[in-house]
Structure formats: structure tokens, C-alpha cells
Amino acid sequence: QVQLVESGGGLVQAGGSLRLSCAASGRTFGSNTMGWFRQAPGKEREFVAAISWNGRTYYRDSVKGRFTISRDNTKNAVYLQMNRLKPEDTAIYYCAAGPNSAVCYPFDDNYDSWGQGTQVIVSS
């Protein structure tokens, strides 16, 4: 059974940093596009970042220059380094696995495996 498990969330002051990790099990995801999404209270889930199997990345505008997505295929893991965090980054962050592709999909319909999420709270 495919499983994605996120970790690394927590409470941080504005301007601080967090590094989220996503550990995949059940099968290897080295050829899959991997993505991070988030959902704030009362809002719809939104795309944050994606990385293709060959390292191509894509970010939503509001996190460009602050967040970095990366992957380690030897560990079947994906990471999201979040710097200069803002209160509006507060959300539950989800890791997702998409198709075998070099395309960084920004739509959650393109992803078929999801983790349970990790909470990120940024205080002002």
C-alpha cells in the first residue's frame, strides 16, 4: 500500500524557517512528479510547489524565493524548505505523488496519492 507521511511542521515566528519532509513507502516515486499543497482554515487546498523526476521545479508566486522543494530519490523522500515564513503561510501542508512525468503539475487532480498532512503555524 502506498503511503506518504509528512513531518517537520510546527509553530514558528514570522521570519523563521521550517523544513518539511515527506517519506514515501509502498513503492518508489523516483519517476513521479511530487508536490506540496496546503490548506488554511476555511480555505480551499492550494498548490505550493512541485518537482519533477528530473528536478524541474515550479512554485506558486507567493512562495517563490522563500520556499525550496527538493527530493532524494535514494531515500524516496521529498522536502520543502520554508524560509522567511509569514502568518499567511499558516496551513496544513500535504505531500502528494503525481504521474511519471517531467511536468510540474499545479493542480491537485493530477495527484493520486496523498499524505495526512502536517500543521504549520506562523505567529506574527
Image: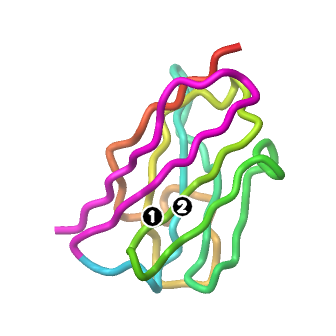
Q: Give the answer, above or below, for where 77 lies relative to 4.
A: below
> Alpha-carbon distance for marks 2 and 1?
8 Å
**Colour scheme employed for the rendering of this structure:** rainbow
Q: Residues within 10 Å of mark 2 (few under 14, many from 20)?
A: many
Residue type at numbered disc 1: Tyr
- Split into 4 quadrants, where in the image is the N terminus? bottom left
Residue 121, percent from left and from top: 55, 24
> Which residue is at 60% across, 25% downward?
12
Residue 39 vs residue 69, the one in the foreground:
69
Residue 122, percent from left and from top: 62, 23
> Which residue is at 71% across, 13% downward?
124
The tag on residue 35 is 2
Residue at image mark 1: 111
Magenta region: which residues?
Answer: 1-26
Query: Does the magenta run of residues contain 21?
Result: yes
Residue 27, percent from left and from top: 26, 78
Residue 75, percent from left and from top: 39, 75
Q: Mark 2 touching mark 1, by CB under 8 A?
A: yes
Residue type at numbered disc 2: Gly
Q: Is residue 16 left or right of residue 76?
A: right
Quadrant of res 8:
top left
Q: Earlier in the sequence, mark 2 or mark 1?
A: 2
- Residue at the extreme left: 1
Quadrant of res 83:
top right
> Which residue is at 52% across, 31% downward?
120
> Which residue is at 52% across, 20% downward?
42
